[in-house]
Image (cartoon, helix red, strand yellow):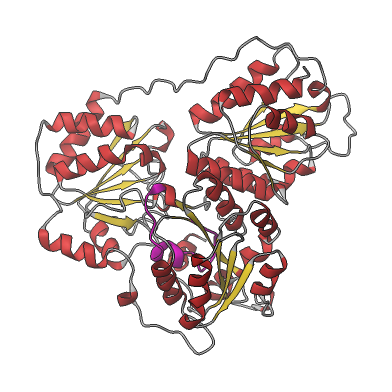
Amino acid sequence: MIVAEAVGQTLARLGAGPVFGVVGSGNFHVANALRAAGVAFYATRHEGGAATAADACARMSGRVAIVSTHQGCGLTNAVTGIGEAAKSRTPLLVLTADTPAADPLNNFRVDQDGLARAVGAVAERVHGPETAVADTVRAYRTAAHERRTVVLNLPLDVQAMPAHTPETVAPDEEPAVPAPDPAAVAALAGLLAAAERPVFIAGRGGRRAAAEIRALAGACGALLASSAVAHGLFHDDPWALGISGGFSSPLTAELIHGADLVVGWGCALNRWTTRHGKLIGPGARIAQVDLEASALGAHRPIDVGVLGDSAATARAVMAELGGRVASGYRSPGLGARIAERARWSTADYTDASTADLIDPRTLSAQLDRILPAERVVSVDSGNFMGYPSAYLGVPDEFGFCFTQAFQSIGLGLATAIGAALAQPARLPVAALGDGGFHMAAAELETAVRLGLPLVVIVYNDAAYGAEVHHFTGDLTTVRFPPTDIAAIARGFGCTGVTVRTTGDLKPVAEWLDGPRSSPLVIDAKIVDDGGSWWLAEAFHGH
């Protein structure tokens, strides 16, 4: 057995996968070793698509996914996706070939360790045949246990060497989570006991603690919200406000701003989640619970920080309160208002559709009604992105995939592919702008080849809308001639539909009633919205 084969077998035994990648000479043998060991391999058309699809698959499945790339240019093609995953603390393993140390003039040679570290990933390396298995296990456990994106370099000369392999690889186990500090728990319990209008905001770090957070919220009368990346976490709770931040409905923004205590559960409380701090009232106390000490108070001063797991902390605070129950922010009248207006609806705007162009709010609201409730929605970046985020409901936290930490456009289609493979029982929905669609169009072939029943909604204003609406000066560089995206989609083997009015949505229902054997691409020609409210907020920081 050579090192490449040992690495593949080791990762299979640890439970890593699936693999997304583009195979070249440098990663051919390790990719085949993974496949031979039973790990699914999904070939994409570009390494950037592979990295983002793997990122989304890991987020929506809870497993460590793998990206497989060729040395040098294969890795550099994937860097934006790797940066997104690293900034999002996605447990992801990038298995990349590397040039031999003895060949410094190799055309493929780049500083791959430095490249990984430059975008926030952890650089690891298989150093030789004696340590190949141990190096691989270390990289996997760093990804799984520390929630990090790890780039594991496999030099070509090392890959081909005979491996020194142990007979077995110990199964991976979750490390024990340290208990939260009792003094910090008592301080948080004290804040909750004194609060009259508490609001809990959960982020990705609260996704495994929904039941415990809800129970504590019920005991102290807190309202519930989430960051965008945890959207859907409290979807069926009558006291849930939806997303906190730029996508908040007017009522949600009003109630969060009115809180006298805001508690972040695995949530950074960053500029996006708090609208640059404006969502938090001037007299509100702030507490944070997080597994990372560096996250506590990183974005704004806090009154109490608890270093610990969200579920364990919520249970400990509940015990500290000793059965105390308070109505807090909750009242029958407020409950009725939340049920009616916490989500954006057609009551919140005047339809600006014309005979030739559809209002993106109307489009999104109609699609929310037409598409099955069991869905997984993936959203690209751009001026349009609040419409699907605000108007398309999701069934739970595994129904919304938001690869936005790097704020790159062009990731949404690959995100939807990875999410679809992680949640095969749900209808995958990709929401893209026309700019992001054109950047990523090659991955339509991947979706067709994999037979994914994918719905792609393209909010098409023939422009980079963020720049058109939020900047001044010569806009000729960010406006483009109209393109027939439905025709492009048909060229890839998709069903393509052009939508200018709500009446044009009939083929969507027909596609849903059919076999769904190929993706549906909706080329929605949208009206000029004058600039979205969420980007107006976001660009305050530029």
Q: Which quadrant: the N terminus?
A: top right
Q: Is residue 390 one of those drawn in magenta?
A: yes
- Establish if 154 lies above or below 370: above
Residue, x 37% and y 58% (percent of image)? 245
Q: Position of residue 522 (x, y in %)?
A: 56, 71
Q: Residue at left 71%, top 58%? A: 442
The boundaries of the magenta stretch are 377-397
Quadrant of the rendered image containing residue 75: top right
* Residue 160 in which image quadrant: top right
Q: Residue 31: x and y, percent? A: 73, 33
* Horizontal arrangement in the rendering, residue 539 relative to residue 75 (left or right): left
Labels in figure, total: 0
Observer-nearest residue: 107 or 96? Answer: 96
Report whether 389 appears left or right of 90. Answer: left
Quadrant hosting residue 17: top right
Report the residue that reaches farthest toward the bottom: 355
* The one of 280 and 132 positioned closer to us in this rendering: 132
Determine if residue 267 is in view: yes
Residue 192 rendering spot, x and y as whole percentages: 17, 41
Residue 203 locus on image (x, y percent): 38, 45
Q: Which residue is at a point 73% across and 19% down the rendered structure image? A: 127
In the displayed structure, 281 sits above or below 34; it is below
Instruction: Identify which residue, 407 or 13, lies in the foreground.
Output: 13
Vertical order, 84 against 109 (above or below): below
Task: Examine the rendered structure and indicate whether residue 537 appears above or below residue 89.
Answer: below
Residue 227 covered by magenta stretch: no
